[in-house]
Image (spheres, helix red, strand yellow):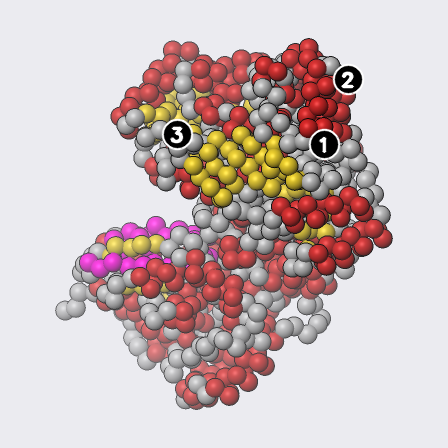
Amino acid sequence: MLVVDEAKAVALQRKLETELPGLVRADRTTRAAYASDASIYRQVPIVVVEPRSAADVAAVVRAAADAGVPVTARGGGTSVAGNAIGRGVVLDFSRRMNRIVEIDPQARTARVQPGVVLDDLRAAASEHGLTFGPDPSTHSRCTIGGMIGNNACGSHSVAWGTTADNVIELRIVRADGREVTVTGTSSGDAGTDERLRALVGDNLALLRTELGRFGRQVSGYGLQHLLPERGFDVAKALVGSESTCGLITEATVRLVETPAARALLVLGFPDVYRAAEVAPELAAAGAMTVEGMGADLLAALRSRPGKANAGDVLPAGQAWLYCEAGGASLADAEERAHELARLAIERVDAVKSLVVTDAAETRALWRIRESGAGIVTRLADGGEAWPGWEDSAVPPQNLAAYLRDLYALLDEHGLRGVPFGHFGEGCLHLRVDFELGTEEGLAGYRSFITAAAEVVAAHGGSVSGEHGDGRARSELLGTMYSRPMLDCFAAFKHIFDPHSTLNPGVLVAPAPIDADVRPGPRRRALEVTPVHALHRDRGSFAAAVNRCVGVGACRSLDTGSMCPSFKATRDEVHSTRGRARVLAEMLRGESISDGWRSEETREALDLCLSCKACASECPVNVDMATYKAEFLNHHYARRVRPMAHYSMGWLPLWAKLLASVPGTASAANVLLSRRPVAALVKRLGGIEPRREMIRFAPRSLSRWMRRRASNGARTVVLWPDTFTNFLSPDVGRAAVEVLEALGYRVVLPDGFVCCGLTWHSTGQLSTARRVLARSLASLAPHLAAGQTIIGLEPSCTVMLRDEATELLPDDPRAQRLAAQTRTFAEFVAEHDGPWPFARLDVRAVSQVHCHQEAKGSYDPDREVLARVGVDTDVISAGCCGLAGNFGFERGHWDVSHACAEQELYPKVRAADADDLILADGFSCRTQITQGTDRQGTHLAQVLRQALRRP
């Protein structure tokens, strides 16, 4: 194991901080966040640097070489093989070296910095009808530099080749700090060229027979590109070198023309073996993709919350191939897809087919396959599954036989796995339920992996097909290559990096495959009994944290709602993955040793908005909001809390007290409207000074209801959440009027009730449990009578339906509450009686509350709005940025408004004066009011406006 001299490491850190101010991060929080990537491996760096230029990279490499400290490059951190971690300096290219330098449509090339995200390049190239061919499933966050490092491929490599096939020229910083231009004919250095030619000349037969035998043979170095018949292409030879020979500062890549139209063919097969047998023929017939997956992947997906019906549109079968066809027109593409279907049916009678041309349907189907790497880290029964043997490849015609032998090997070792991958090119991804947490289990891991390497080699295959060798497979290269070939690899590395400064332990002089395993025997020193039941993780907080396998979906900037704080900061620490890594290090007790009192962990969690987007959008449903609540509960146990936890965490109590004496709420509003008073309250309450204070309603909803008789054929219970009851009672009044117009008698629970949301979000879980239990007692007669509980505030409704059973798992009333609670939109949409509403025929911008988006659905709202003639433009960027107490807490102003500026504010500002601004969440309406000149409206208020008056 590489040991970094501590004194030299400290000296290096100081030197770098002096030479590169503002770019060097050596705090324990950052180092913990970068301790792993998407692999099972862990190495805590001594420092992380975010370079801005090639000069910065060169300065780091020279300083590190002088100090004898290794350097590792990192892009999106989505490496599954452990290529992007190291104990020395980690260079994160994604944050500052992410510029598209030039696109040349005529030459069909692009010049990019290494931190450019693939989707950004594809979007820019698409303006010219072009794209970058390789497209891994992580395309929304993986970087071009990382793709070059691993020789990434993706689903379209059947048509457009590997990354190596699409690289023209590289600018690299070598191990001595020199920057050179590497081309298709030279390394940029005459002496290096001479040594490389000598290496090739001495080993011509070896390179011709052992390398380049099939497209997905990416293990080892690509020395076949140096052969005379291949033009001595040094740039291509460096693709797949995993930052062991040089650090990329710029790349020139080839772009390809995209077809005018595409159609997706999905084929259902009786089993995965017959799918594998047909796949190469479909590739040879011109399919642009031939992607495979088994039924066990679909079963794992359907076990996720809210995904029970996922993949219902798939044709019948136990395995599927996704085949894309291109054409000059949609009809042409569709006809080609049907031709491929006929070919498959000729080969296997039982094949079922589906051809899709609708863009939304196509995207939904692809999402199943692309989420595979994350989905299958949890098997259908909840068991953990891990990478390690997730990237093997064989000549495509051998895939079916290899699969049979691999399944037999799994059975022999008592293991289960979920296969998927690029069947048309013989590349297989497989997550396996290894027991990595014990020494015995780790020995079993080694036993299986080494045996699997022998199996793939027997089929003429490669231990890596696109993810690189990294720490997961470099030790296995001797299984598929001869000793002379391994010597060639070592000589190639030595020519570029004689002192092994760059990413040591990878490819040459490899680290053991069972060293530094993150979920290994020492993964948990801090034992804890969580307050939440954590049903999906069998009550284990550590298992919940270890859900994060690092695929990095939380780093996607332009798609989905996750992760708002990362989108605002582009800081790994403030991604869901970064926080999970810090929590894991806290539980491990090594790099972060002060357990629940850890300030590093508190810092990492501070900018988590608790929006719950990760609970649904993360492929493995990491629920960082819950983990944050657990952490804060333990962190502040028997300690003084931040004042915001008292001022906002106890808001339901303060609001109730103000409402209990007539005139008190109005008096408080008058006082808070005076700047000196408001400033004092904000300072004492830990509230952001730039925030406007909320206003309390002069008369609460519950007081208004006491003076009102409600009649109807059926009784429903309206949940009087704190925000509706004491701050925005007009929403409640509107809901009552609408429900009565639908023919219902509306009642409120007796006494003061609260879901405990504000205590939960501030980590005061004992209080949240007590408040919930008291509320359940008040609701007991209504629950026993089977009455529906209707929620108006989305976050509170989620508390009633989801969190109540987690906080009070042994209370059967919590289960009944979850079953009987409906959102206002759900209840109205399900109403089958007279429809008392007229059409409004207006447009609207709609901000869906983040908790509703994560734990529910906006479909009922869409249905109701459509029936009353409201044409909705739904914000797709997720959380509004206020997120309850988050946006009001001191220090969160910038991130809060940056989240809103993603989409909400621009669309609200652009809306016409007559357009509605819809927002059911009190936080969302507050953010809109305080950030624009518009007011948000609740669905209940819209429906009251649409009521037909007698």
Image spot of residue 597 (x, y percent): 73, 63
* Residue corresponding to mark 3: 257
Q: Amino acid at mark 3?
A: Glu
Label 2 – label 3 distance at C-alpha? 42 Å
**What is the crowding at mark 1: few (fewer than 14 residues within 10 Å), some, or many (at least 20)?**
some
Q: Is residue 413 magenta?
A: no
773 and 806: which is toward the camera? 806
Kindly identify the residue that appears in the image at 71 percent across and 71 percent down.
638
Image spot of residue 629 (x, y percent): 60, 61
Disc 1 secondary structure class = helix
* Residue corresponding to mark 1: 496
Q: Is residue 853 magenta?
A: yes
Kindly identify the residue that appears in the image at 69 percent across and 67 percent down.
637
Q: Is residue 283 visible?
A: yes
Label 1 – label 2 distance at C-alpha? 21 Å
Looking at the rendering, the stretch of residues picked out in magenta corresponds to: 841-866
**What is the crowding at mark 3: few (fewer than 14 residues within 10 Å), some, or many (at least 20)?**
some
Picture layout, residue 168 above or below residue 691: above
836 and 935: which is toward the camera? 935
Q: Quadrant of the N terminus?
A: top right
Q: Amino acid at mark 1?
A: Phe
* Residue corresponding to mark 2: 483
Task: Residue 73: name its quadrant.
Answer: top right
Mark closest to the chain's N terminus, 3 or 1:
3
Task: Residue 699: name its quadrant.
Answer: bottom left
Q: Is residue 182 left or right of residue 753?
A: right
Task: Residue 340: name its quadrant.
Answer: top left
Image spot of residue 71 (x, y percent): 72, 43
Tell which residue pokes out farthest to the front in this image.
190
Q: Is residue 155 left or right of residue 431?
A: left
